Image (cartoon, rainbow, N blue to C red):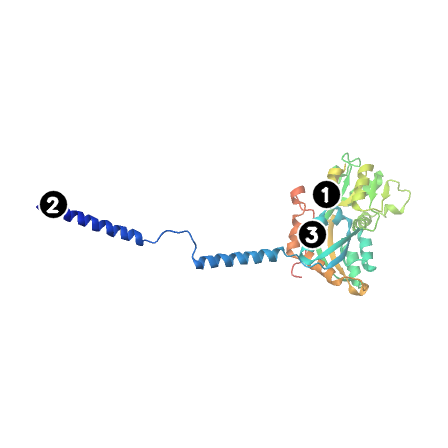
Amino acid sequence: MKMKKVLIAMLLVLAMLATACGGEEATEAPATDAPTEEATEAVDTTEEAADTTEEAQEEPVEAKGEIILSTTTSTEDSGLLDAILPDFTDKTGYTVKVVAVGTGAALQNGRDGNADVLLVHAKASEEEFVEEGYGVERFDVMYNDFVIVGPEADPAGLKADYGADVKGALQHIAEEKAAFVSRGDDSGTHKKELQLWEAAEMTDPGEDAANEWYTSAGKGMGDVLTMASEMEAYTMTDRATYLAMKDDLDLVIVVEGAEDLFNQYGVIAVDASVSDGINTEGGQAFVDWILAPETQELIKGYGVEEYGEPLFVPNAQIGR
């Protein structure tokens, strides 16, 4: 009987312990992945901010019409303008009508009120344009260099005998009556060529009809390179246009590296006094854009991937 009472007591204790454990489990808070109210509000706020930022980035700049850029053929033939002008339109809202001619013709377009801004490469003529009141101010933008190219056979032996001696090379071309094609269009390249003939103590070969070896084409750089290739002739070109076209030409560089072959480009907004039709605001927007560090970086990078070197070297005076 005594043993029976002990067993009953033990069972009662076990029952009480089981009830206590069950109560603790029942009161334990269940695990959940649901966010708190504060966390939900924070997520909503973040998403709204992200949506607002995305909308601001995607919203296009208001269209502001068209400006006319009168420029040399080398900036177009080299592909530079196609590469960088979309950035100008995206940032300012202006579209650009490009008139690619020789520098002399581009400056005349400015004088006639047929351009809002100029991008050319004949510094002395550009400074004269500003001094005469046609341009607001001239700024350096970028540079490359001129080279003399010719047939791979190099019949005049310029590459082997003259290297960077451009004056000696021109004198030898004239002595040998080697076929030479000139822009002959008052472009920046043509102006430079004439300066080099003068520096070589020679008159312009184009002035003497007896110089049958000398062809004055009156065409842009791309056309002249094609002519020289077809004629197996020499010509002077800016390096950028040559590199952009060389796969389609039977021409190689035979003279390069002379200090005299430096090729500086400048930008000028046409003065409002030239004509009531000048888009002064758009022209100035182009000047400010092309001198900006971001655009200078675009210029610096153009051509590197395809040609292993930039076709133009930016040198704008930032913070002018």
Give the CA separation, mark 2 to mark 1.
109 Å
In this view of the protein, which residue sits in the foreground, 129 or 203? Answer: 129
Q: Nearer the viewer, mark 3 or mark 1?
A: 3
Q: Which residue is mark 1?
A: 244
Q: Residue at x 56, y 56 (%)?
A: 51
Regarding residue 214, the answer to whether it shows in the image is yes
In this view of the protein, which residue sits in the foreground, 136 or 4? Answer: 4
**In the displayed structure, would residue 38 be above or below residue 100?**
below
Give the CA separation, mark 3 to mark 2.
100 Å
Outermost residue to the top:
153
- Dot 3, how many residues are within 10 Å of its Cα: few (below 14), some (14-19), or many (20+)? some
Give the mark, 3 or 2, whose residue is nearer the N terminus.
Answer: 2
**In the displayed structure, would residue 106 be above or below residue 4?**
below
Quick one: SS at disc 2?
Answer: helix
Where's the C terminus, which quadrant?
bottom right
Give the CA separation, mark 3 to mark 1.
20 Å
Q: Which mark is residue 4?
A: 2
Tell me whether circle 2 and circle 1 mark residues in contact (CB < 8 Å). Answer: no
Q: Is residue 45 left or right of residue 279?
A: left
In this view of the protein, which residue sits in the foreground, 12 or 282? Answer: 12
Q: Which residue is mark 3?
A: 86
Tell me whether circle 3 and circle 1 mark residues in contact (CB < 8 Å). Answer: no
- Dot 1, how many residues are within 10 Å of its Cα: few (below 14), some (14-19), or many (20+)? some
Image location of residue 1, percent across then percent down: 8, 45
Q: Residue at x 27, y 50 (%)?
A: 22
